[in-house]
Image (cartoon, grey):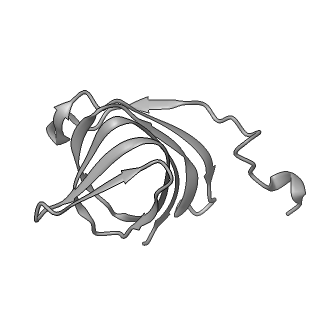
Amino acid sequence: MNIAQIVDFSINTPPAQRYSPAPEKVLKGQPEQTVFEHYNSPCGQFGAGVWEGAVGQWSVNYTEHEYCEIVQGVSVLRDLDGEAKTVRAGDRFVIPAGFRGTWEVLEACRKIYVVFEQK
């Protein structure tokens, strides 16, 4: 391992991966999303990058632990009981594996993420 293997988000520009949630998960709008995967570990359990989401709402079921830092926009996370948490630029939080509910983007959102898939 050497210094050249450090992943610097400011100079590493991975290709954009554009997608939409599965149609049966979409609850509102057309929540198109883009991911820039800056790093994936060789074992496939750890990753980090940048995510962008368009206005809309969809169902989520987290199998991974995710650290998020919102750098732009506003979103609302809701659990299955209907409890809500609004997140906006500057907010940092962790979504534990097992969280189920919805993610709603109110204003185009961009986040830096770090995920760990527990096997």
Quadrant into which the N terminus falls: bottom right
Q: Quadrant of the C terminus?
A: bottom left
User: x and y percent of residue 83 in the render?
Assistant: 16, 63
- Closer to us: 94 or 74: 74
- Choose top left, top right, bottom left or bottom right for residue 55: top left
Q: Horizontal and vertical percent for residue 11?
A: 77, 39
Name above or below for residue 20 compared with residue 112.
above
Q: Residue furthest left?
A: 81
In front of the other: 54 or 86: 86
Quadrant of res 106: top left
Depth check, front residue: 71 or 116: 71
> Does residue 38 appear to the left or right of 8 in the view shown?
left
Q: How many marks?
A: 0
Relative side of 108 to 56, left or right: right
Above or below — where is 69 with respect to 81?
A: above
Q: How far across and down, in percent of the image, does residue 84 sit?
A: 21, 59
Residue depicted at x 47% and y 48%? 89
- Above/below status of 28 relative to 116: above
Query: Taking 49 as reference, is 12 left or right?
Result: right
18 versus 68 height, above or below: above
| Percent x, y of residue 71 | 52, 45
- Which residue sits at x=13%, y=62%? 80
